[in-house]
Image (spheres, rainbow, N blue to C red):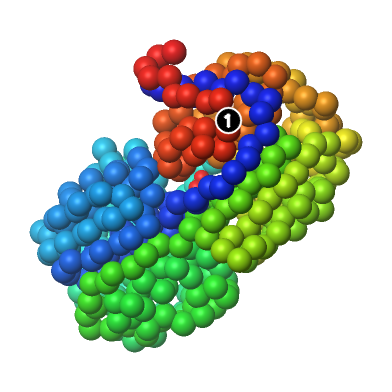
Amino acid sequence: MDSIRIIGGKPLEGELRVSGAKNAALPILCASLVADGQHTFRNVPDLRDIHTTAKLLRHLGAEVEVAPPLVTVNVAPVDEPEAPYELVKQMRASVLVLGPLVARYGRARVSLPGGCAIGARPIDQHLKGLEAMGAKVTLEHGYVNVVVPSGRLHGAEIRLDIPTVTGTENLMSAAVLARGRTTLVNAAREPEVEELARVLNKMGASVEGAGTNVIVIEGKESLEPVDHSIIADRIEAGTYMVAAAATGGNVFLDAITLDHLEAVAAKMRQAGVIIEREASGVRVVGKPPFIPTDVATAPHPGFPTDMQAQFMLLMCLSSGRSGVTENIFENRFMHVPELNRMGAKIEVHGRVATIDGVSGLSGAEVMATDLRASASLVVAGLVAQGTTLVRRVYHIDRGYERIEEKLAGLGATIERVKGDA
Ligand code: EPU
């Protein structure tokens, strides 16, 4: 298992190109299953989750070539629309094939993803929506079996209890081939949902309202393959914005959409970080100590849970006390004990972390069990005095393309250590 070794204390400086969005690419690749033929996707990040999705699509009869940033998917009909445990356990986003498969074949068998490090993460809302569209859902042997007795889903009005992101994406992808109109109420509003709608519409679907909490989909008889370039990753961008500020640096992020990061930018500015739009991107300049700033995670357009760990790191370098409330996942504070081992002063009570700013961090051997927590530890390592070894970087490789190369390009002393360091 690889590790990342960092010698901290250098301000990040220079220019950075943010990769395509993982959480847009995953649902889009899965949604390609609704249209037979050759799809071309551009600006796809080179990440472990993309390779896992490719394996899954191949298992579902598609020919997939992954040559990031280019990915081609040639979709052909399959006899067994099934996502096996072997692949779903590697990546819970595999559940995103459920909606497309049921739409295309009137049936699907997908392994239940189960819980993960950050929470229980049920998929009841996905299943409730499919049932409203005429599917029969049974759970057996760890699999969800979905069958549409009439062979084709029908439109329905579906009110989600929670604005679930992948749930909204699954139901949107299911509804594009359903008979009639589907209305998703209390839909997720994330930019990745909008991006999926854009792609489905390019395929010939009729999806309106994505980006608001009511999405209306008119089902079509069939759809066409697409050629599409994926939006920049707002969470990768936000992570580098925090890294720039936390190290007292000055970094220009090329071609990112600051509108997708409004809540993060607002909180960073409140904390004293300078974030300026320039002609083709965004410049971030910061220097600790930061102004103590409270955040509470919420569905988009609120503060994203995927930036919570990184923002907390920033608050470790503030001049006072701040609070971070995690409202989306029940167990997303795994970075806290590790940051405390590096000299941070954070206490957790339930969903709330209280952070007392410190004047610096010290390098240590650390490890985390989720992607964003690991990212916050890498940023902590950039700030800390001495050497930090972040173990189990396979979590980072799920979501950050060539993180050590990108940070080294900004002047960090960072290297990947192969195997069990
Ligand atoms: N939930 C339910 N029932 C459902 C669906 C969700 O109770 O049927 C709950 C979840 O357990 C959670 C909350 O609703 O407490 C929100 O979960 P959501 O379904 O919105 O999350 P997700 O779709 O599984 C996506 C991202 C996550 C990101 C969350 C929240 C993808 C592939 N994943 O997950 O990204 O944290 O939305 O924004 O899009 C990451 O990239 O590191 C990551 C974890």
Tell me if residue 337 comes above or below residue 209 in the rendering. Answer: above
Question: Picture quarter containing residue 343?
Answer: top right
Report which residue position mark 1 lands on. Answer: 412
Q: Residue at x 72, y 47 (%)?
A: 285
Tell me if residue 325 comes above or below residue 167 in the rendering. Answer: above
Q: Quadrant of the C terminus?
A: top left
Q: Is residue 114 visible?
A: no
Question: Picture quarter containing residue 185?
Answer: bottom right
Q: Residue at x 83, y 32 (%)?
A: 357
**Foreground residue, 70 or 120?**
70
Question: Picture quarter containing residue 308?
Answer: top right
Dot 1 falls on a residue whose secondary structure is: loop
Disc 1 marks a residue whose amino acid type is Ala
Pinpoint residue 125: horizontal percent, then vertical percent.
47, 61
Pinpoint residue 179: horizontal percent, then vertical percent.
29, 83
Q: Residues within 10 Å of mark 1 (few under 14, many from 20)?
A: many
Tell me if residue 330 comes above or below residue 27 in the rendering. Answer: above
Q: Residue furthest right?
A: 320
Tell me if residue 15 comes above or below residue 370 in the rendering. Answer: below
Q: Residue at x 23, y 83 (%)?
A: 221
From the Cβ of disc 1, is ligand 1 less than 8 Å away?
A: no
Pinpoint residue 381: horizontal percent, then vertical percent.
62, 26
Pinpoint residue 412: horizontal percent, then vertical percent.
58, 30
Q: Quadrant of the N terminus?
A: top left
Left or right: 86 in relation to 266: left
Left or right: 103 in relation to 119: left
Q: Residue at x 37, y 17 (%)?
A: 419
Left or right: 136 in relation to 416: left
**Foreground residue, 404 or 377?**
404
Q: Is residue 408 visible?
A: yes
